[in-house]
Amino acid sequence: AQTVTQSQPEMSVQEAETVTLSCTYDTSESNYYLFWYKQPPSRQMILVIRQEAYKQQNATENRFSVNFQKAAKSFSLKISDSQLGDTAMYFCAFMKHGGGADGLTFGKGTHLIIQP
Amino acid sequence: DADVTQTPRNRITKTGKRIMLECSQTKGHDRMYWYRQDPGLGLRLIYYSFDVKDINKGEISDGYSVSRQAQAKFSLSLESAIPNQTALYFCATSVRQGLRGYTGELFFGEGSRLTVL
């Protein structure tokens, strides 16, 4: 079974700063997917970024990028030039390659607060 | 209109009552999921379904049942609700993306907040 650990229950930064959210995972699989999902106060779950484990290049989506360290089983999310709209819960998630039949395994989340 | 619709959005009920949460999707996806979200615990899988005839238990299925009435509809039932089932419930869908298979992206509904008194 896979586990996903987010060690930062809450973080707070000033607007325009860069912030990094941590995620580690444990698996015996060699190929898998990793995700960051965002949940703003509206409670909608929104996919932020996805990383395929066989790809060495770190995924980026505009201001969002990841630092994927496969050997260390680490998958951190960096948000550059943070904005007030980035305030949300952020969940790290894991899925086995091939479409893990049981969907995603989620971490417990990090509540990110962007201060004006 | 949302592609994945959950009803009701909010519900308050009493211990022992039967509750049904409904989910419908217009995305044409084959896989559907029910997750439960509790503060400090993240999202945990209750049930998942590959198609109408294929339903599987997830991590925390005790006290819940589901029905896949059609490819587009997946309902979650609490036969006799108890207070520790108070939570935010999410329905989600996924689909095979060509040769890549299921790449893990889930498409979520807006959640159903259930309070059991």
Image (cartoon, rainbow, N blue to C red):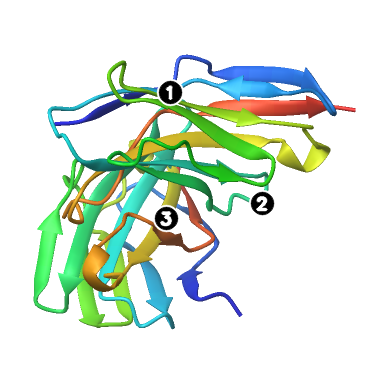
Q: Position of residue A92 (x, y in %)?
A: 43, 34
For label 1, the crowd category at 10 Å Cα-Cα, with few meaning under 14, some 14 to 19 and many 20 or more, is: many
Circle 2 sits in a helix, a strand or a loop, which is it?
A: loop
The reply to whether callout 2 and callout 3 are in contact (CB within 8 Å) is no
Q: Amino acid at mark 1?
A: Cys
Task: Give the residue at x 39% y 30%.
Answer: A107
Q: Position of residue B6 (x, y in %)?
A: 47, 68
Q: Amino acid at mark 3?
A: Phe
Task: Give the residue at x 55% y 62%.
Answer: B9
Taking B42 as reference, is A50 above or below it? below
* The N terminus of chain A, quarter of image: top left
> Which chain letter goes with mark 2?
A
Q: Amino acid at mark 2?
A: Ser
Question: Mark 1 sits on what residue?
Answer: A23
Task: Give the residue at x 25% y 63%.
Answer: B100
Relative depth, front residue between A68 and B28: A68
Between disc 1 and disc 3, the foreground one is: 1
> Which chain letter goes with mark 1?
A
Residue B12 appears left or right of B27: right
Question: Mark 2 sits on what residue?
Answer: A42
Q: Which mark is residue B50?
A: none
Residue A18 appears left or right of A22: right
Residue A114 appears left or right of A42: right
Relative depth, front residue between A50 and B115: A50
The lab-note entry on whether marks 2 and 3 share a chain reads: no
Relative depth, front residue between B40 and B21: B40
Question: Mark 3 sits on what residue?
Answer: B90
